[in-house]
Image: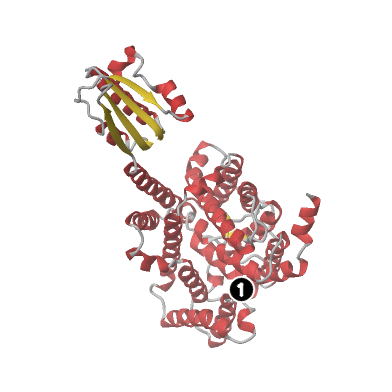
Amino acid sequence: MLLLAKQDWLGNIRGDILAGIVVAIALIPEAIAFSIIAGVDPKVGLYASFAIAVIIAITGGRVGMISAATAATALLMVTLVKDHGLQYLLVATILAGVLQIVAGYLNLHKFMSFVSKSVMTGFLNALAILIFMAQLPELTNVTWQTYALTVAGLGIIYLFPFVPMVGKILPSPLITIIVLTVFVYFMGFDVRTIGDMGQLPDTLPIFLWPDVPLNLETLAIVLPYSLSIAVVGLLESLMTANVIDELTDSESDKKRECKGQGLANIGSGLLGGMAGCAMVGQSIINVKSGGRGRLSSMAAGVALLILVVFLGDLLSLVPMAALVAVMIMVSIGTFNWTSIKDLKTNPTSATTVMIATVIVVVWTHNLALGVITGILIGSLFMAQRLSQFMYINSSYDEASDTRTYNVVGQIFFNSSDKFIALFDYKEAVDKVIIDVHRAHFWDITAVGALDKVVIKLRREGAEVSIVGLNEASETLLDKFAVYDKPDQIDKIMGGH
């Protein structure tokens, strides 16, 4: 274990530190922009990005992954901040961290297997739409200079990477911030700047216990937001961990990551920061820049704080148009444009799940609710498909006057009615054999269906036997079936 820890921290010192500095520079405009989305001072997002990046470097389960303040969590905070203020946001952040730690101990990370590709695509597309919609207030009732600066910013973001030598080294969002800030300063344009949004930090963060009453009323206010933040944060973090696993051809500890994200959010809330989670874009930047170990995330957090504290006066001059351009870039990069083309070729069920996820998220501004909706709809489609693969073949032996039904497939709540309908209850035979060697009974609805079939056949005078039950199905039937319990038969048949 000591050797592994040494490798995580000291196995790539130069690469991790340089990558961390690049990530820190790229984090600054996004942390400020996410703060503004949430409706709080820029220092809240900057402190959060510092705290989360440093703490997750120590506690996280995916080395080389960057966590900080994010748009996904910021969007969930808007109403809470507007209605109750910053102090309640800090409480919600701490509680979200506690819930994430509990999720880690409960192994809830395993439920990621229920998130289909269609749900993930809908999740990302909805996130992209919400990020873009959050920029509209900054583009409404403004001067022409704001529109011109935004267009120019987008031009720099997408064209700068093609500049020889430096284009691939320096992050284009940072170059956009620098160029537009210098241009606005010397041209004297009257446009909104970061300084108009709130006071930037000029000191190191300090321990800050939220100034709110600790009672049930406070819990009732923050719990819904904390649940959403915890779920969305874990979803995005675990999805990002999968991406980095693929890029680095390595495995991550998802359980530890859940706990680590929780500890990072608790630390952020206690240092005056907002909740956050893993960042897909920044994590990829880190890996592509050579970051592989925990030191890269630590370096990113520390470098960010140093830059903010000592360059706060310069950061206050940054025009909002530059941040709008950065966030539009994030929105465009997040949206899965291929999914539009795939609408014609993907199965109807996959398209429906994706679109439903997008609609619910955009309508409610709740990413977790959209993901849950997508999972539920996808599960219903899967249940429907599974029920279609259940069928019954029958054969008749005239010598023994026996009808044998061979059941194939999965018997559960969605296929139970079909299972009942496939038997001929009016056929006059002495014996009926129900062969279930190639079938499986999954739930009490399936058991109830078998009860009805057996009882109906017996009422027509047939001797019924069941053969081929697997161990799991037999256990379920022994516990819940009533066809061999005369006192229970009337209940299952409705008293008739």
Q: Position of residue 61 (x, y in %)?
A: 66, 52
Question: Of residues 217 and 488, which is closer to you in this image?
Answer: 488
Report the residue at 22% width, 29% height from top: 424
Q: Is residue 226 visible?
A: no
Q: Is residue 477 visible?
A: yes
Which residue, given by chain and number where applicable, does mark 1 sit on?
A: 315
SS for dot 1: helix
Q: Quadrant of the C terminus?
A: top left
Amino acid type for the residue under numbered disc 1? Leu
Residue at the outermost top position: 487
Q: Quick check: 33 left or right of 338? A: right
Q: How many marks?
A: 1
Q: Quick check: 442 left or right of 166? A: left
Q: How is the image coloured?
A: secondary structure
Question: Of residues 212 and 396, which is closer to you in this image?
Answer: 396
Q: Position of residue 205 (x, y in %)?
A: 68, 58
Q: Position of residue 324 (x, y in %)?
A: 48, 72
Report the residue at 48% width, 28% height from top: 471
Report the residue at 43% width, 62% height from top: 125
Q: Position of residue 464 (x, y in %)?
A: 31, 21
Q: Quadrant of residue 174?
A: bottom right
Question: Of residues 435 and 488, which is closer to you in this image?
Answer: 435
Q: Is residue 207 above or below residue 327?
A: above
Q: Quick check: 337 left or right of 405? A: right
Q: Is residue 173 above or below residue 478?
A: below
Q: Residues within 10 Å of mark 1 (few under 14, many from 20)?
A: many
Q: Quick check: 348 left or right of 289? A: left
Q: Is residue 258 above or below residue 429?
A: below
